[in-house]
Amino acid sequence: MMQRKFLTIWISHIYDQFVVFVNKVNNSIILIRLLSKIYHFQFYYLYKLFSNAWFSTVVKNIMLFFSKNLQFIIKYAKLNIISYPVFRLLTFFYGFFHNWGITIIFVTILVKIIMYPVTRLQYISMLHMKTLQPETQKIKNQFCNDSRVINKKILSLYKSKKINPFFSFLSIILQVPVFLSFYYVLVSAVELKNAPFIFWIKDLSSYDPYYVLPVCVILSILLTQYHELSYNNIIKKKNFSCIMPFLCTFFLFWLPSGLILYYITSNLMTFLQQWIIRRNFFKNNKYN
């Protein structure tokens, strides 16, 4: 019987088939019964039946000593194949830092560095497409009544410039599973329960009591959005939308601090990587 971050297991040493009955008596009492086959005993015959019971939080390293393969009970939604390596990576570096907050920051930076070649490919492709916006706009104005011709002409233009539009989505396609795996691990990992980070954050599995981290998420999103706008478009910079970050933050208020910490680190790393790529792109003035 498994609840969020808590597990109740009864492992019998009887290797025959048996049935387990679980009845909830009230909010604090649960009755567990085990029904096995009928055993016949002779007089003065001693027969010992052994079983183990687990009533605790879901801690994989401890569960391994309790019973073989017990850790596979834990599933991180449908992304277990990615989430489990992320969990192992977090627990590995926790052995060095002994602080889950620092571990989350370090692993997030490490993953973003590993994903940098894909991010660079995607962002450069997007910059190439932006440099061609005047030409694509001419095509749209010229063939405004025929969307089929517009798409064909724009694709031909990209092909002549050796630009693959698919690369602009490649990073997103690859990063979404990584993002979701971090989400499921950080939301369900019992290791974060009562785990302090710094100062006022005493429990990374709970929300920030002073909402400082959600505000930092707003600032990181606004910083990234502002950077995304064209350097020459002053009007857009003055009027760019601030509504979306604030709407998103309302959903972040009650999320675990460990997950918010991941969002902040990921956003800042994205900003830094895009700033480096954009600077080198325009500095070198090359489009390949």
Image (cartoon, rainbow, N blue to C red):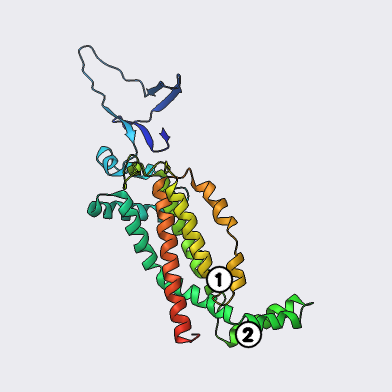
Q: Is residue 83 above or below residue 52?
A: below
Residue 22 horizontal side relative to residue 68, left or right: right
Please name the residue that numbered disc 2 is placed on. Answer: 157
262 or 168: which is nearer to us?
262
Is disc 1 surrounded by few (<14), some (14 to 19) or many (20+) residues within 10 Å? few
* Residue drawn at the location 24% of the way across and 40% of the way down: 65
Q: Amino acid at mark 2?
A: Leu
- Quadrant for residue 159, please give it: bottom right
The residue shown at (54%, 56%) is 245
User: Where in the figure is residue 141, as x and y percent of width and height?
Assistant: 74, 80
Q: At 54% from the left edge and 52% from the top edge, which residue is drawn?
A: 248
Q: Nearer the viewer, residue 266 or 202?
A: 202
Q: In the rendered structure, find residue 229 and report the number of the disc placed on it.
A: 1
The tag earlier along the polypeptide, 1 or 2, is 2
The Cα atoms of the two marked residues, 1 and 2, are separated by 23 Å
- Estimate the x, y position of residue 51 in percent, counting from the top left: 28, 28
* Relative depth, front residue between 5 and 124: 124
Tag 2 secondary structure: helix
Q: How many marks?
A: 2
**Eyeballing the image, is 89 above or below 59?**
below
Please indicate, yes or no, whether residue 81 appears anywhere in the rendered image.
Answer: no
Amino acid type of the residue tagged 1 in the rendering: Leu
Q: Residue at x 47, y 81 (%)?
A: 281
Closer to us: mark 1 or mark 2? 1
Image location of residue 178, percent across then percent down: 44, 59
Q: Is residue 66 above or below residue 170?
A: above
Q: Residue furthest right?
A: 145
Quadrant in which the N terminus is drawn: top left
Q: Secondary structure at mark 1?
A: loop
